[in-house]
Image: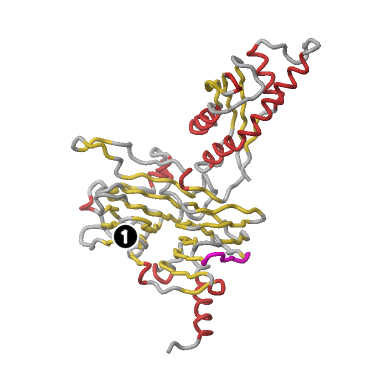
């Protein structure tokens, strides 16, 4: 569970009296306790009223990394009616990210502290505790990384050639077997030729039209929405957006993890070693680790699952790729579908919801899992799900290593056999 711990009302009152000239606790005159109590209640009510906003700021920060922790102090100046006239940051702990302090500051600037006289300055100290784990992240909460932002081209301001969000890795979801990023390539832009010496990769195109160029002499591969491409370890490739008006949006899966580190820190030595930019594409050669492969969802037969309440299209698995590093499927759950509690021995699961949503139960806790969110389910972790009762849910399902997806082939074959031969 995500928890934001806000300092006690007593601490807040102490800060208030220090800055308004009121008598401090312990040296109060006869009427001071009632004043202290009145102000303490006012601040406590304000914290209760606006605590969800602070919690949301913390949740957003945790989407990027789990080790968010530390203290910050915000001073708010009270105007008529208890409304905050302005808020400013007084102190920020070294482990508190700037985005978190900016979010809390923006929130506090709209607070109301009823019962505090106009002109008072109240110092609000906040304390945040790092989390042991989390299982679900919203893509909207994850910061974009990549090349510098907008540039001018022909007098027109354009965005960067590409941007990346690290959705699941060891830093934010403690995913150690596989990592997932969201890659957005701008219109008529590309990611220059590169390779990942130690990791295999899957590209799944969520939006747009793109192509992947390999070494000289290999034909380009065109990707449409719903296409997945497997790139074996060390395969040189260029990712190019064929559209001139809209971005191309991909899921990138790496196993073992490693290349995603360079997005978090371009100077990271391990990340740079696993994301090798090829300066002279004419010298790029095919690796001996396997062949690239493209699968289009439209050409993949659907398999029945959970008693006909879901259909699964296995785009990439060990049989297709020649190795069991990972598998990728597109799953459609019928409205109200229920996935019974189960686990995957030895295999991590990532579930990226494309549309729809529902509730996923991991261990003994329930988590909302909405569109454009990802769930990380560690190997051997029991889990279940209940999907939206009013609309279908479509999700990209990834296993690392591959294997659990084969159960769909078994159940699908059994369902087909039960139906009997087609006439």
Q: Magenta stretch: residue 336 in it? A: yes
Q: Where is residue 54 in the image (x, y as percent from the top left)?
A: 58, 35
Q: How is the image coloured?
A: secondary structure
Quarter of the view holding residue 32 = top right
Q: Magenta segment: does it hold 122?
A: no
Q: What element carries label 1?
A: loop
Q: Which of 76 and 295 is in front in this view?
A: 76
Q: Which of 379 and 8 is in front in this view?
A: 8
x and y, in percent, of residue 86 in the image? 52, 21
Q: Which of 62 and 55 is in front in this view?
A: 55
Q: Position of residue 170 (x, y in %)?
A: 51, 47
Q: What stretch is highlighted in magenta?
A: 334-341
* Residue marked by disc 1: 287
Residue 192 seen by the camera? no
Residue 48, compared with residue 171, is above or below; it is above
Would you say 384 lies left or right of 35 here? Answer: left
Could you say where residue 31 lies in the image, as x and y percent from the top left?
78, 13
Q: Residues within 10 Å of mark 1 (few under 14, many from 20)?
A: few
């Amino acid at each position: 569970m995500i928890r934001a711990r806000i300092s006690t009302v007593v601490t807040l009152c102490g800060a208030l009296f220090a800055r308004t000239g009121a008598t401090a606790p312990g040296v109060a005159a006869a009427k001071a306790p009632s004043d202290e109590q009145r102000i303490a209640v006012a601040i406590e009510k304000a914290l209760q009223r606006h605590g969800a906003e602070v919690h949301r700021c913390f949740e957003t920060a945790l989407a990027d990394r789990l080790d968010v922790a530390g203290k910050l102090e915000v001073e708010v100046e009270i105007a008529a009616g208890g409304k905050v006239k302005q808020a400013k940051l007084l102190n920020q702990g070294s482990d508190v990210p700037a985005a978190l302090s900016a979010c809390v500051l923006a929130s506090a600037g709209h607070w109301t502290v009823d019962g505090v006289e106009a002109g008072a300055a109240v110092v609000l100290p906040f304390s945040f505790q790092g989390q042991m784990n989390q299982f679900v992240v919203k893509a909207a909460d994850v910061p974009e990384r990549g090349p510098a932002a907008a540039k001018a081209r022909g007098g027109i301001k354009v965005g960067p050639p590409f941007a990346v969000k690290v959705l699941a890795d060891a830093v934010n979801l403690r995913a150690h077997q596989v990592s997932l990023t969201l890659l957005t390539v701008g219109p008529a832009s590309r990611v220059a030729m590169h390779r990942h010496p130690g990791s295999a990769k899957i590209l799944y195109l969520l939006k747009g039209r793109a192509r992947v160029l390999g070494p000289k002499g290999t034909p380009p591969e065109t990707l449409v929405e719903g296409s997945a491409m497997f790139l074996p370890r060390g395969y040189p490739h260029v990712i190019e957006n064929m559209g001139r008006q809209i971005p191309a949006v991909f899921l990138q899966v790496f196993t073992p993890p490693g290349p995603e580190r360079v997005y978090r820190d371009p100077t990271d030595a391990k990340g740079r070693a696993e994301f090798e930019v090829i300066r002279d594409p004419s010298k790029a050669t095919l690796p001996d680790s396997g062949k690239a492969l493209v699968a289009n969802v439209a050409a993949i037969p659907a398999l029945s699952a959970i008693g006909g309440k879901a259909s699964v299209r296995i785009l990439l698995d060990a049989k297709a790729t020649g190795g069991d590093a990972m598998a990728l499927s597109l799953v459609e759950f019928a409205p109200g579908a229920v996935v019974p509690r189960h686990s995957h021995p030895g295999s991590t699961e990532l579930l990226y919801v494309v549309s729809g949503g529902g509730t996923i139960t991991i261990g003994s806790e329930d988590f909302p899992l909405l569109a454009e969110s990802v769930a990380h389910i560690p190997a051997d972790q029991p889990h279940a799900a209940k999907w939206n009762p009013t609309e279908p849910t479509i999700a990209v399902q990834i296993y690392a290593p591959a294997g659990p997806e084969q159960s769909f082939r078994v159940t699908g074959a059994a369902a087909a056999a039960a139906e009997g031969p087609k006439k």
